[in-house]
Amino acid sequence: MGLTTLKRRAEFLRVRGGPRWGTPALVVEAKPRAGGDAEAGGEAPGARLGFTVSKKVGRAVVRNRIRRRLKAAARELMALAHPGVDYVIIARPAAVDRPYAELKADLAQALARVHRAAEARRLR
């Protein structure tokens, strides 16, 4: 199963302001898409992910390696993602040396906490 990814800057910026949770290796931001967005663009109604690895993390080879590792972890954890929600995963410098199992655990924890924060926001 492939990932549906965010491509345009506007999509990344739209996710800002939603619930977010950080771990030592990454930060996850999430925001539900508006009901008409998925149908208007002809996109699948599933979750979409965006990956950000800044130059602060390392040179191009390091950034690409981290992005590949994050994508692999996200592919394995897609069952935790809610349909109709956009996620942005931001790598932190600790992601460079983090073992894959811990990186995956960080992502799972962040997804769970973001969903919990979103639920708490809706109940207010």
Image (spheres, helix red, strand yellow):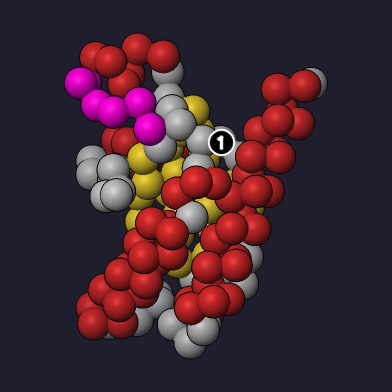
Label 1: which secondary element: loop
Residue depicted at x 23% and y 82%? 61
Residue linked to disc 1: 18
Residue depicted at x 45% and y 31%? 83
User: Which region is colored magenta?
Assistant: 41-46
Image height of 115 relative to 53, above or below: above
Q: Which residue in the rendered view is the most extreme toward the front?
A: 1
- Which secondary structure type mostly characterizes the magenta part of the structure? loop
Image height of 112 relative to 37, above or below: below
Residue depicted at x 59% and y 58%? 108
How many numbered badges does the structure rendering display? 1
| Any part of residue 16 in sight | no
In the rendered image, residue 86, in percent from the top left (x then y), is placed at 42, 37
Q: Which residue in the rendered view is the most extreme toward the bottom?
A: 97
In the rendered image, residue 90, in percent from the top left (x then y), is placed at 45, 59
Residue depicted at x 51% and y 35%? 82
Residue type of the residue flagged with mark 1: Gly
| Any part of residue 36 in sight | yes
On the image, which quarter does residue 69 sit in?
Answer: bottom left
